[in-house]
Amino acid sequence: MAELITDVSRLAKSCILRLNSNHVCLVVSDGGALGGTPGLWAELEQQHYFSEYSMEGVSEENQIFLELQTDKLAKTLSSLRSSQSTRSLKIKLTKKLSPCLTFEIELPSASGRSRLVLHDVPVSLIPRRLWAAHQEPRMSHQFDVSIYLPPIKTLRHVVDRMKVCHIRSRSGTLVVSVSNSEVAASTHFRNLTVPAWDADRNDDPETAYGTSVDIKKLSSFLQGDHNTAKVICNIVSGRLVHLFLMQEGITLQYFLPAVSAP
């Protein structure tokens, strides 16, 4: 969980924390594209991370929506990751001078007795009338092409130092290119895996679909701890790149809207 929160803090200064009986979701609403999709949607299965989980929402949907600063949450969880002796962690919604997520961390002491360390992360409660703006993305646009990305570390080295890049794909090949009035360069990743739902397309194998995206946003995603994860790149030509990551206990979707090439 700490790695995911750190990744989200690189992508956005604040996020919405959505809690329900089965999942903990992180939502970044800014920067989305196509029909009001969010910029980022990360979903964690609560049973994978918590031995005990109890919540009571304010409606029949049994949900709670909170807004918080991602760097403060990442700093709290990073301190846990650096400590190999943490005995237990409790996360509670509390009301002190203002609403907070309170992290109760049980650590051993030199005497052998436990000591309790508290971290408070301020949060803002999102009123129910605004919940609709932070719902799970429903893609109404069919993707033109889908492909598994090459190793993240390799791709990260390619896109570093670009400003705007063009991503296109066809027949198991991903092309990352950059061009301006002085230079044009491209890198081809061949023989990549195609998701099952894209393998039966009847498109011309020579047809390529692509979109220009902000390289800073793409690079921020690639800086994350995704080296062991499989990431699918879905493209709506000229409009959107949708990055979809799944690994044990986590689903992450990142939306990159098209930008104008320089």
Image (tube, rainbow, N blue to C red):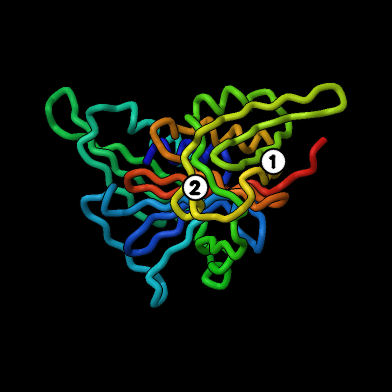
SS label for mark 2? strand
Of residues 34 and 25, the one nearer the viewer is: 34
| Residue marked by disc 2 | 244
Front residue of 216/57: it is: 216
For the N terminus, the quadrant is top left
Within the image, what quadrant is residue 211 found in?
top right
Residue that extends furthest to the left in the rendered view of this protein: 112
* Residue at image location 19% in from the left, 27% down from the top: 109
Q: Amino acid at mark 1?
A: Val
Residues packed near mark 2 inside 10 Å, few (<14), some (14 to 19) or many (20 plus): some
Whole-Å distance between the Cαs marked 1 and 2?
16 Å
Q: Position of residue 75 (x, y in %)?
A: 45, 34
Q: Between residues 76 and 36, which one lies in front from this camera angle?
A: 36
Q: Which class describes the residues within 10 Å of circle 1: few (<14), some (14-19), or many (20+)?
A: many
Q: Residue at horizontal 81%, vertical 22%?
A: 183
Circle 1 sits on which residue? 213
